[in-house]
């Protein structure tokens, strides 16, 4: 199973991706996680990405395309994957098509979690609160200013990605405002159908 999961920050992509990983025995490839690991490691990539990420902007396409190119070749991705947070621009979507063709892989589906933007800020505030309560570390970009920039980047650069996949007939749009288990059921139905 090879999937792309689209949706704005706070749409519930991480939660649903974890469930898909368990159900299909595939790996979750999150460019956000990879970039945060690079920042934590202080690598050249991490240094280039840190400020952009903290401000809520998008890291240059070529850097994330490179990350995905390498990651798709790892043995654990051979039985399938779910891309979470990638592609985020039409240029990344086109590059992904080229990479998959080169690797002789095809996508089974592109799932988009559609959510009401007004609810997103509330969700992020809840995420911050829950992380704090659990004694975890709040992400540097989980604050109202960066979040606004992340939403703007989504609207401007990532929303066209869903139109890109819709025009190819690959897109399945799902109600991300529904309760978590219902979203999971809708995803199951979309993938079985
Ligand atoms: P995420 O964990 O998906 O919310 O990503 C956190 C941050 O990492 C984003 O706000 C961007 O700064 C950066 N990022 C993650 N994935 C990408 C991508 N595909 N293209 C550009 N920047 C990305």
Image (tube, helix red, strand yellow):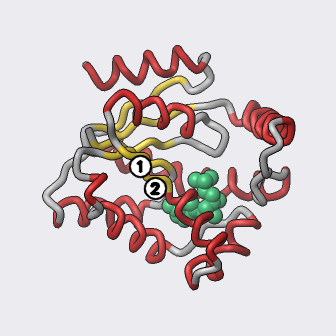
Residue 170 lies in quadrant? top left
Which residue corresponds to mark 2?
86
Which is nearer the eye, 103 or 39?
Answer: 39
> Which of the 4 quarters of the picture holds residue 172?
top left
Q: Name which residue lies at 18% across and 53% down.
A: 105
Q: CA distance from mark 1 to mark 2?
A: 6 Å
Q: Residue at x 43, y 46 (%)?
A: 28
Q: Furthest residue to the bottom?
A: 44
Q: Residue at x 27, y 45 (%)?
A: 80
- The residue labelled by disc 1 is 83
Q: Is mark 2 within 8 Å of ligand 1?
A: yes
The local secondary structure at tag 1 comes to strand
Q: Residues within 10 Å of mark 1 (few under 14, many from 20)?
A: many
The 10 Å Cα crowd at callout 2, few under 14, some 14 to 19, many 20 or more, is many
Q: Quadrant of the N terminus?
A: top left
Q: Nearer the viewer, residue 34 or 193?
A: 34
Q: Which mark is residue 35?
A: none
Compared with residue 178, is residue 26 higher up or lower down, i.e. above or below? below
Circles 1 and 2 in contact, beta carbons < 8 Å: yes
Name the quarter showing ligand 1.
Answer: bottom right
Helix, strand or loop at label 2? It is loop
- Regarding residue 187, the answer to whether it shows in the image is yes
Which x, y percent locates residue 20?
Answer: 41, 32
């Amino acid at each position: 199973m090879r999937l792309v999961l689209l949706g704005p920050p706070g749409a519930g992509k991480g939660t649903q991706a974890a469930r898909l990983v368990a159900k299909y025995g595939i790996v979750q490839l999150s460019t956000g996680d990879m970039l945060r690991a690079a920042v934590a490691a202080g690598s050249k990539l991490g240094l280039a990405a840190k400020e952009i990420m903290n401000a809520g902007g998008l890291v240059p396409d070529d850097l994330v395309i490179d990350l995905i190119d390498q990651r798709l070749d790892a043995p654990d991705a051979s039985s399938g994957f779910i891309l979470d947070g990638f592609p985020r621009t039409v240029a990344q979507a086109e590059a992904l098509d080229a990479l998959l063709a080169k690797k002789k892989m095809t996508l089974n589906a592109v799932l988009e979690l559609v959510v009401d933007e007004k609810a997103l800020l509330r969700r992020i505030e809840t995420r911050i609160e829950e992380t704090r309560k659990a004694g975890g570390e709040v992400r540097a970009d989980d604050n109202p200013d960066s979040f606004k920039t992340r939403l703007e980047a989504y609207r401007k650069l990532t929303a066209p990605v869903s139109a890109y996949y819709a025009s190819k007939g690959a897109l399945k749009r799902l109600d991300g405002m529904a309760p978590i288990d219902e979203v999971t059921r809708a995803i199951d139905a979309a993938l079985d159908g």
